[in-house]
Image: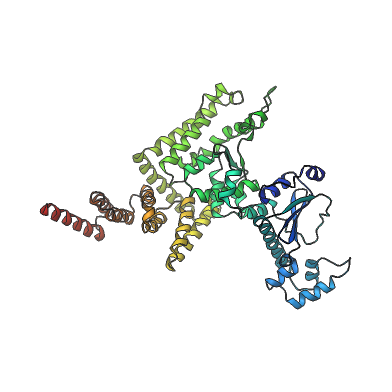
Amino acid sequence: MAGAALQSFNPLDRRPLPAILADLSRRRASGALAVVGGSGRRMMVFREGRLRATRSTFEAERLGAWLAGRARIREAELALALLAQAGPDAAPLGRLLLERGLIDEPTLTRELEELGVAILCRATTEPRRQLSFDAGVDTRQPDTLPDRATARFILVTARTLDAEREAPRLLADPGRAYRCVGVPSTLASRLDATSDERLVLNALALPRTLGELTLARIMPADALRRALLPLVICGAVAPANAMADAPSMRRPAEHGVWSEAELQERAIVTRFMKETSDRDHYAVLGLEAGASYADIEASWTRLAARFDPARATRSTHLSDLGDALEKSYERIRTAYETLIDPTSRVAYNRIHKASRLQASARAGESAVSRGNPQDRARRAIVRANLHRADQALRTGDRHTAYTLLEAACALEPEPEALLKLARLMITNPMWGERALARLKQALELDPGLVDAWLELATYWRRRNRPDRERRALQQALTVAPDDGRAATRLAELNGESSRSRKHG
């Protein structure tokens, strides 16, 4: 395999370095990739597709200088260790430092990993003059990278890419469907994914195109590209149906043997009802509770086409799954019809929220800790983001608070968090419509949130819309008849209206 990798390696490959690393990993290559740039050279050593070591001729990127520069060892200790390392049979520096008690193993392991990441990132971002792959290099490197997933190192490196420049090349087809390669929560944990990357992994639990992801508005479009690009490069996200995307690659079904794409679709159909039979309407459509109506419409369009019962008569590989298609279609349609109608959605949200609160009260905190790992991870991220957002607000760091609240609400929209986010957005004249959307979302989830109605009234007052302000205040008093703030403002508004008519 290493020989094949060497024969087919292109030294003029202009792809970004993380994409080349991922390609070598997929081909299970063994050898060293050398990247020459500036006045030095960096090497990435692979063994059967696993990234095992990084080397560099840049002085600051050598292990000794790195450890001294980060105050892990003293300069005098480093000098003595380097003296002891003289000779062909000397132990590698890391092992020598361990034997002399100058560093402990956990610290060395961590520093080797961080040095490896630094070398990879600098090799990615700095201009390169030459590229080569040598399959004859000894891959039994003594000071190796920790035995972690190679995909994680590639992901960290890919984050340094300019998404605006690379995404059009690497994500060129907006109609191509992508899917998470594995369980989203497991992948996110193994890769140490960021909050945005976790959002994308969760959104791609079922196949979605780039267009659908953008329409879903799980995050701003530029943030979506920055999160998706590294996931695609490292292989955590892949085209959902590469066989279908390239007709010339399809394998015809012969003698009852289906193609890979057909087998994958059969698995999706047979699994869908089992996974969604006890889920709420939002989960059936693959959405969060705060999804917009455009999200609901887009999800219905995609899922209705996939689970159309008529496909059992049109597609040979689904001919025996007519009953599963029909039941799935009905489940999807029920969810869609409930959520697309504003009146029924508000009623469903109340019931949904009440059932969740009752279940939580019955089960207690211990049940939450034993729940679905993906849900636990999501809740932990949401709690951490909300806590940090509150800290940022106390220190006046509104930008950080906004970023954290956006991430928390995208993962698990809660009325109070949405209200905080809307209040931050309202202060920016450019974000008026987005603030209004967040307020509406909060009120859809909790129509009894009186502070949201008052904020909505303030929103319309700033835009000189007394009719809408009045309706929001009246709704606030319907929810909380004794609320003095709403009553006082409504009286002022009625007085202003009376004086206006008198002057008129």
Q: In this view, does 43 lie to the left or right of 421?
A: right
Of all residues, the one furthest to the right in this rendering is: 88
Looking at this view, is 354 or 346 the one in front?
Answer: 346
What's the residue at 53%, 26% (across, down)? 323
Q: In this view, does 498 lie to the left or right of 175?
A: left
Looking at this view, is 241 or 224 the one in front?
Answer: 224
The location of residue 127, given as percent across then percent down, is 67, 56
The location of residue 190, given as percent across then percent down, is 64, 53
In the displayed structure, 384 sits above or below 248; it is below
What's the residue at 44%, 45% (across, down)? 291
Q: Can residue 154 be seen in this view?
A: yes
Q: Quadrant of residue 102?
A: bottom right
Looking at this view, is 95 or 349 the one in front?
Answer: 95
In the displayed structure, 500 sits above or below 352; it is below
What's the residue at 78%, 70% (across, down)? 97
Q: In this view, does 353 lie to the left or right of 102?
A: left
In the displayed structure, 410 sits above or below 325; it is below
The location of residue 332, given as percent across then percent down, is 47, 34
Q: Is residue 316 left or right of residue 79?
A: left
In the displayed structure, 227 sits above or below 174; it is below
Of all residues, the one furthest to the bottom in this rendering is: 76
The location of residue 219, given as percent across then percent down, is 49, 49
Quadrant of the rendering where the N terminus is positioned: top right
What colour scheme does the image use? Answer: rainbow
